[in-house]
Amino acid sequence: MKTHLEVAVASPLFQTLSYACRPDQDPPPIGVRLLVPLGRQRVTGYVLAQKPAQPTEYTIRPYLRLLDDSPLFHPNMVPFFRWVADYYQYPLGEVIKLALPGGLTLRSSKQFFLTEHGSTTLPSLVDSVSPVDPDWLPELIRIGSLSASVSGRLQKSADKALLKKWQRQKLISLEETLKTPTTKIKKEWCVRRSTTPLPAKLKPSESKTLALLTELSAPKNKPLPRRDLTRLYKTAGPAIRSLATLGLVILSEKTVYRDPFGERPPFFAKPDTLTPEQIQALEIISPAISAKAFTSFLLHGVTGSGKTEVFLRAAEQTLAQQRGVLVLVPEIALSTQLEGHFFSRFGDTVAVLHSGLSAGERYDQWRRIAAGEATIVIGARSAIFAPLPNPGLIIVDEEHDGAYKQDDGLRYHARDLAVLRGSQQHAVVILGSATPAITSFYNSQQGKFNLISMTKRVGKHPLPEVDIIDLKQVKTVSGRPPLFSPQLMAELKKNLADGNQSLIFLNRRGFANLLLCSDCGETIKCPNCAITLTLHKGRNRLLCHYCDHQANSKPLCPACKSPRIKEMGFGTERLETELTAIIPGARIARLDRDTSMSRTNFLSILKKVH
């Protein structure tokens, strides 16, 4: 019996489409990508279902090409994708495209190419085209083609009549091209010793390379990455090629995963005992995990009450049942902290999904999860789409945080989708917070969530004392509030003298958030957003924190052209500078977006503090 495929295409269509299977191939499984025809275009499609072919008055077109060797998502994700598309009113194919790692979508486009006749004729016609040649013409003559974006723009511009005339004259052609994906599987060459006997004589480099290979791959003669040999012995590259020609080594290509972790997060030891409240919380959660039925919990625990250990013990029980664990955190910074706890306990079964990864690293982590090689996933809000085949536990840490809301493109709330996915896939959902969202707390009072309260800190440590100081009441010579109050400076110096650490938080980065003209009072503003630019002295730039517009750090007043610009306000960069001057003996680490653009820098700072 013939089979038709239900396919969601990566285009703004709300309905799915049917495509016929190729007669020379088996029907592709659910969760793979296909290259399919859509009108005159070729686009990426996602297989959602297989169904027997039904008689129809229409011709069902076959798909063009299979793009994946194995599914990118499990069939149990299809109802989830359908619900998200329907509830948030977003095209189903676009939902799946956004869920998958970036750079995988194929799409056809049209480009202008210079024909053989045009390459000899068109340069001589340039001067007669117009008094001012089009800006795209030199590129067309020099390269022989125009990019897809330029070609698309020109077909709607005033130059389209000229381009059509040249097409009729066979000077140029408009051809369909396929954009190749920017993210691909990474492969590397491996070397293994063959059983061929050694010849009487080898070059010194060949002998050394062969001895090194034998030593490193012993005792089982496993294939060794070529780069490992060339890193230890620089001349190994040419030697490997000549040894392969002699049949003394075997070269093979192996698929590898890009390492997204780099420097590993800090280690956290497993506590020997649990607090009575932790034990009580686990006694409530454990039966639900054992029952393999959907249950939702709101774990309301004060800061330091040990919620993370409850998460870890619940994860242990879930993994023992051969089910997966999904952990959502609102930000990458919190992701790294939890990574440390989960890596310390579960090792390489942990995968991470967040925007801090490169496209290739995210694709590799996605493939590990889909293949069942990673059973624990930690990530920010987009990790709610992680392709766990059989999730048994979904944890939403700091569930109250507004970062779980996606506010552009597909607008969704990851916390709400976590509860939905748990209900669809019969998983236990734990929402954890010291300050739950009002909606979550209300749902717990209405019986939708099971409330678990943890009111005591581990070790019975008291909550810190809080002093609120009004800086407006602190008298200064200038009459403006000081950067630090006398009480804060005294406590910082005393804490340092006692050998303790201090944490200072400020919700603003940069050195000065207001630049004011001393002559006319005009402020330096972003031309796009009409908000004041922030001075970043380390980068020697003025930045807009909304649109990232940048300007010279020493501007002239836009109103009176005066160079006398006064730096007002403060941010984390200025705090660091002031503290270094006030307490010269202190070792100060600044952790903000400017100092932790890469994961390596972020972990390095965290480890120094740790």
Image: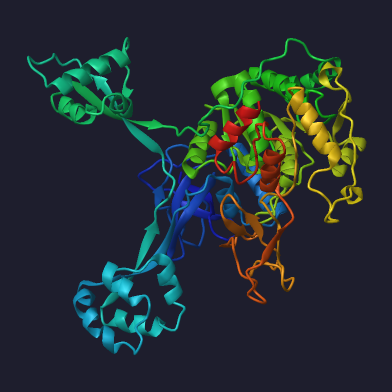
Please name the residue shown 82% across and 32% down the image. Answer: 491
Where is 212 relative to 574, above or below?
A: above
Q: In this rendering, does residue 148 appear at all?
A: yes
Q: In this rendering, does residue 297 appear at all?
A: no
Q: In this view, does 573 lie to the left or right of 126?
A: right
Residue 349 location (% of width, % of height): 56, 24
Residue 292 location (% of width, % of height): 72, 24
Residue 141 location (% of width, % of height): 27, 73
Q: Quarter of the image holding residue 512?
A: bottom right
**Residue sticking out furthest to the front:** 477
Where is 94 relative to 142, above or below?
A: above
Q: Quarter of the image holding residue 243?
A: top left
Asked whether 235 or 451 is in front, the reply is 235
Q: In this view, does 25 lie to the left or right of 73?
A: left
Residue 237 location (% of width, % of height): 23, 30
Please name the residue shown 34% across and 83% down the image. Answer: 133
Asked whether 129 or 59 is in front, the reply is 129
